[in-house]
Structures are given as structure tokens and as C-alpha cells.
Image (cartoon, helix red, strand yellow):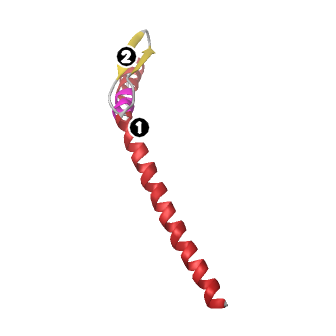
């Protein structure tokens, strides 16, 4: 009886591991899809209109460059 219970627990663990692997792969695919299908964004900042294009990562980097430029212009300091 104990062996039968242990076998059920083992099989259940294997199934859960398999399901978690499938879910992890699905999430990875979704994140890749999201990163490549982000729409361009038009942003109004400091009386300027800027269009952010590319993947989410590219838009993020472009946004950071813009904010660093504004920071430098307003403070005279270089952002570190």
C-alpha cells in the first residue's frame, strides 16, 4: 500500500513538472512575441513630439536617451 502511494506521488510530481515546463515555454513565447510586436508610441515631452519605434527594449532605450538628453540640457550635468 505504501509503495502504491509513493508511485502515485511520484507520477503526480512528474506530471506537474511537465506541466510547469509547458507553461514556462508558453510564457517565453509570449514574451518574445510581445517584444517584437510593440506598436510605435508617440510621446509629447517638453513641447516636443517623439515617436518611439522598435521592440519594447528598443523603445525603452530610446526613451532613456531622450530623458538623459533633457536632464543634461536642464541641469548642465551629465547623467551617470
Q: Where residue 3 appears, x then y in whole percent?
A: 61, 90
Q: Nearer the viewer, residue 38 or 29?
A: 29
Residue 34 numbered tag: 1
Which of the image's four quarters has the C terminus? Answer: top left
Q: Residue furthest right?
A: 1
Residue 59 lies within the magenta run: yes
Q: Residue at x 46, y 61 (%)?
A: 21
Q: Where residue 30 appears, x then y in whole percent?
A: 43, 44
Q: Residue furthest top?
A: 47
Q: Earlier in the sequence, mark 1 or mark 2?
A: 1
Q: Secondary structure at mark 2?
A: strand
Answer with left or right where residue 16 lies relative to residue 39.
right
Residue 54 numbered tag: none
Q: Nearer the viewer, residue 22 or 1?
A: 1
Q: Where residue 63 appears, x then y in whole percent?
A: 39, 27
In the rendered image of this protein, does residue 24 appear above or below residue 76? Answer: below
Magenta residues, start to end: 58-64
Mark 2 highlights which residue?
50
Q: Residue at x 67, y 90 (%)?
A: 1
In the rendered image of this protein, does residue 48 appear above or below residue 10? Answer: above
Amino acid at each position: 500500500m505504501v509503495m502504491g502511494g509513493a508511485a502515485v506521488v511520484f507520477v503526480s510530481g512528474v506530471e506537474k513538472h511537465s506541466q510547469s515546463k509547458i507553461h514556462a515555454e508558453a510564457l517565453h513565447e509570449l514574451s518574445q512575441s510581445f517584444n517584437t510586436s510593440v506598436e510605435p508610441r508617440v510621446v509629447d515631452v517638453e513641447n516636443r513630439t517623439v515617436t518611439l519605434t522598435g521592440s519594447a527594449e528598443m523603445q525603452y532605450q530610446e526613451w532613456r536617451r531622450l530623458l538623459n538628453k533633457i536632464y543634461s540640457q536642464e541641469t548642465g550635468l551629465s547623467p551617470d
